[in-house]
Amino acid sequence: MTTKLDTATAYVPSPDAIESRMGEETVILHIVSGTYFGLDAVGTEVWDQLGQAGGQSPADVCTHVRATFAGAPDSVESEVTGFLEQLAEHDLIQQA
């Protein structure tokens, strides 16, 4: 089942999600379910955006990724939104 996100709603990391940084990469662990994700530099940037005060909407995260990574593909919106939907499906993010 795919979780659909409201692109205008802000999302934040779940209080049950902990992270560990290794250079430009991040590992996120949901401490209740044991689910974990390994993030590359782009995923880490997305995660950092969600961690800002008040969180960020998927639309704002996409805008940030496009501005931060020169040459971002045209598919950035669908890729970032799909990634956020996976995080939400595993209870790693929630509405702000």
Image (tube, rainbow, N blue to C red):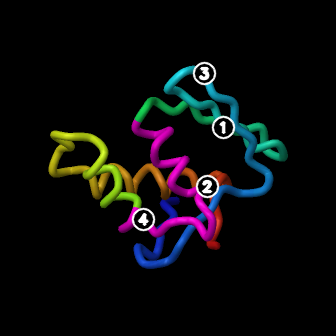
Mark 4 is on which residue type? Pro
Reading the chain from its start, which is encountered first: label 2 or label 1?
1
- Residue 57 vs 8, above or below: the answer is above
Q: Mark 2 points at which residue?
A: 51
Measured from the top left, where is residue 22 in percent x and y? 60, 21
Measured from the top left, where is residue 48 in percent x and y? 54, 48
Reading the chain from its start, which is encountered first: label 1 or label 4?
1
Label 2 CA crowd tier, 10 Å (few <14, some 14–19, many 20+): some
Q: Name the residue under label 4.
A: 58
Reading the chain from its start, which is encountered first: label 2 or label 3?
3
Say which element carries label 3. Answer: strand
Give the magenta part as a residue range. Answer: 42-60
Reading the chain from its start, which is encountered first: label 1 or label 3?
3
31 drawn magenta: no
Distance from the alpha carbon under mark 2 to that under mark 4: 13 Å
Left or right of residue 31, residue 46 in this image? left
Secondary structure mostly seen in the magenta stretch: helix
- Residue 2 vs 74, above or below: the answer is below
Q: Mark 1 points at which residue?
A: 28
Reading the chain from its start, which is encountered first: label 3 or label 4?
3
Reading the chain from its start, which is encountered first: label 2 or label 4?
2
